[in-house]
Image (cartoon, grey):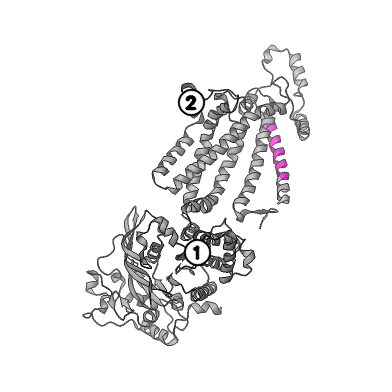
């Protein structure tokens, strides 16, 4: 399939009073047309920064894109100036933000907030934009759309607001939708509804999606492929099945082991000991080594390259080197991966739908 | 809405009554008497004058008489200014004060918001430092320094404007500038702080992600959300600006209300003190009502509807 977006060796730093924080340290991934790529990682792993760089929505001048290329339909977005970027934002690439309670302007009617982008990019009249806004509200499942367009955000509940945010993002039929933890601030029932909505819409509009989350359970439901980020780098990337059934990186094992599932036999969830490294002076070797029970000597010396597991599956751990000792995931995680492989997908996000 | 306003008006009347009462008794506690040079008067003459102005009655009777007249719209007659009714004094004097105050308020607020916007948009840049410095200077340097400076530069040296007195519009320019420095600096400072906060909020990022222009982001999404605290500060300032400021009116020799007010306190001209205080209080209360209605206009979350939020 054709590549819509290619991010190559992206490095982003923040200049702070305490020195340079290397938030993203060389990230490479691509997004195919029509697919959903999930980026998973804990807070501070650089997933939001990496995707905000795509739209150049970082707080400049504190944030500096130090290196890399971001090719969108073979054009380097990093070479575009602010004016050219404005034509990409909201039109070709849209973004859905985390907290619907704060991501809408409290003093503007939601109809106007949806229409703004449409008028800007499609040059249609106000009444046409209004018609489109009502259609969008209906598309995202807001009842009485005709009356609701004239209301303000405070007259909507959290889940409804997130639907409005999605409607805004869909305004110009973007080719790429970036969803930055769109369900994190919502309760479980609503989470499931919003995920379902996003899946339906994506199928309808045939757009690509980057789905950022720290919740692996959400990923299994929505993603075609998964990239796991740690300390500003992608440590493992592969098809969703490959990550859930056959993970290779100890960090991914840790994530899988710490994820609550419905069909889990064991009572206890494993945890990953320690904390992520300080990205002001990232470690010389593998950033995950200090927290890794399977760390090798070389991890302290040299960063592991991406080892190929299959055509679609890569992982950055020395354990995959031909000279490395053969290590199996912890039994609990093995058990889990087997369970996922049998049942198809972890039963977590669906929990909400039933309740 | 109408019910809300009617209800507010009732409270306003009550507030005015309380202010009138408190001012009345406080004023009576002032030392001295309205009579000048009592030594030159015989006891009988003094007695006669006090009787004539009703100052011999017990305080409670004077109070009752005053409130009775006030309800009928009678503010009394000045002791000091050759028996002119207080309403006439205010009417004659309020023109220049109101004009100066309104000009200074409008110009100062608009320029201040502009300055604050520039500072916020170019946060931590040269423009920010320039406008912040200007704002700090404007707030910390007293207006009489500016007034003197303006007179010296533009009236004495350049001769563009009259030095003082009150004639046509050109007479109002220098005092307006001197008077507007403070509201300008205050508006600039508040706009800057509020805008920096608003521009950092999530919905601005949403707006930016839509690809709309920076201009629309700052004005449509930013400014409106920054206005609430600004109005809270500017409103009360409006009342005091409109009723005249002693300093500016003295320096520019403008026959305004501020000068009049201070004078009436000095000579214990009771009716004039009462009249001016009540006028000031009235303006204040009206402006507070206007501010409350504006809040609702700006922010739909605090829209009033019969006293309850919708």
Q: Nearer the viewer, residue A64 or B278?
A: A64
Q: Residue at x 39, y 86 (%)?
A: A338
Tell whether position B304 is magenta: no
On the image, numbered disc 2 is attached to which residue? B154
The residue indicated by pointer 1 is A99
The answer to whether residue A82 of the structure is visible from this angle is: yes
Mark 1: give few (<14), some (14-19) or many (20+) Cα within 10 Å: many
Q: Looking at the image, is A338 positioned above or below residue A279?
A: below
Q: Position of residue B166 (x, y in %)?
A: 60, 24
Left/right placement of residue B68 relative to residue A72 reads right
Circles 2 and 1 in contact, beta carbons < 8 Å: no
Relative horizontal placement of residue B41, taking residue A195 as reference (left or right) = right
Left or right, A162 with reference to B89 = left
Q: Which residues are magenta?
A: B9-25
Q: In terms of secondary structure, where does tag 1 sit?
A: loop
**Quadrant the N terminus of chain A occupies:** bottom left
Q: Residue B241 location in percent, x, y?
A: 59, 34
Quarter residue B64 falls in: top right
Q: State the SS at label 2.
A: helix
| Residue in the picture at 31% in, 57% down | A20
- Name the mark on residue A209: none
């Amino acid at each position: 399939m054709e590549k819509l977006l290619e991010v190559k060796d992206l490095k982003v730093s923040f200049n702070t009073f305490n020195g340079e924080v290397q938030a993203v340290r060389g990230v490479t991934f691509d997004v195919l047309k029509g697919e959903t790529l999930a980026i998973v990682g804990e807070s501070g792993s650089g997933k939001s920064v990496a995707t905000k760089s795509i739209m150049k929505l970082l707080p400049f001048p504190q944030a500096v894109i130090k290196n890399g290329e971001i090719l969108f339909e073979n054009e380097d977005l990093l070479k575009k100036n602010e004016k050219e970027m404005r034509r990409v934002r909201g039109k070709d690439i849209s973004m859905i933000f985390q907290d619907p309670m704060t991501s809408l302007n409290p003093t503007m009617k939601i109809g106007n907030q949806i229409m703004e982008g449409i008028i800007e990019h499609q040059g249609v009249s106000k009444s046409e934009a209004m018609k489109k806004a009502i259609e969008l509200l209906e598309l995202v499942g807001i009842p009485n759309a005709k009356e609701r367009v004239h209301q303000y955000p405070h007259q909507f509940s959290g889940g409804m607001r997130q639907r409005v945010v999605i409607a805004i993002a869909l305004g110009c039929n973007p080719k790429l939708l970036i969803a930055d933890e769109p369900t994190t601030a919502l309760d479980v029932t609503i989470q499931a509804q919003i995920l379902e909505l996003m899946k339906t819409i994506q199928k309808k509009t045939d757009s690509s999606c980057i789905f950022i989350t720290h919740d692996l359970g959400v990923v299994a439901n929505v993603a075609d492929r998964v990239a796991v980020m740690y300390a500003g780098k992608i440590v493992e990337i592969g098809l969703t099945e490959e990550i859930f059934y056959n993970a290779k990186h100890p960090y991914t094992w840790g994530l899988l082991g710490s994820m609550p599932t419905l069909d889990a036999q064991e009572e206890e969830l494993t945890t990953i000991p320690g904390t992520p490294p300080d990205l002001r002076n990232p470690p010389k070797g593998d950033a995950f080594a200090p927290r890794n029970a399977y760390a090798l000597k070389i991890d302290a010396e040299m960063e592991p390259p991406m080892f190929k597991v299959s055509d679609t599956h890569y992982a950055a751990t020395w354990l995959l080197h031909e000279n490395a000792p053969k290590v199996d995931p912890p039994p609990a995680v093995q058990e889990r991966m087997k369970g996922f492989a049998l049942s198809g997908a972890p039963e977590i996000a669906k929990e909400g739908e039933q309740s | 809405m109408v019910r809300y306003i009617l209800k507010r008006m009732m409270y306003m009347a009550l507030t005015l009554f309380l202010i009138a009462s408190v001012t009345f008794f406080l004023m009576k506690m002032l030392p001295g008497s309205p009579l000048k040079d009592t030594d030159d008067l015989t006891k009988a003459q003094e007695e006669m004058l006090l009787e004539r102005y009703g100052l011999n009655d017990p305080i409670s009777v004077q109070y009752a008489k005053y409130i009775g007249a006030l309800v009928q719209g009678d503010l009394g007659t000045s002791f000091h200014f050759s028996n002119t009714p207080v309403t006439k004094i205010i009417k004659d004097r309020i023109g220049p004060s109101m004009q100066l105050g309104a000009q200074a308020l409008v110009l100062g607020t608009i320029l201040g918001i502009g300055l604050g916007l520039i500072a916020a948009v170019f946060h931590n840049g040269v423009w920010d430092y320039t406008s912040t410095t200007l704002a700090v200077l404007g707030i910390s340097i007293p207006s009489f320094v500016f007034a003197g400076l303006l007179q010296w530069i533009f009236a004495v040296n350049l001769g563009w404007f009259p030095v003082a007195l009150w004639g046509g519009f050109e007479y109002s320019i220098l005092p307006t500038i001197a008077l507007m420095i403070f509201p300008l600096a205050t508006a600039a400072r508040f706009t800057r702080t509020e805008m920096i906060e608003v521009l950092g909020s999530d919905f601005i990022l949403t707006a930016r992600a839509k690809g709309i222009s920076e201009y629309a982001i700052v004005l449509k999404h930013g400014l409106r959300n920054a206005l609430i605290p600004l109005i809270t500060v500017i409103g009360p300032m409006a009342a005091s600006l409109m009723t005249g400021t002693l300093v500016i009116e003295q320096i520019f020799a403008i026959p305004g209300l501020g000068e009049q007010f201070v004078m009436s306190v000095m000579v214990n001209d009771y009716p004039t003190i009462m009249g001016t205080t009540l006028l000031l209080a009235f303006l204040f209360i009206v402006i507070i009502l206007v501010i409350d209605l504006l809040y609702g206009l700006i922010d739909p979350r605090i829209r009033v509807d019969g006293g309850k939020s919708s």
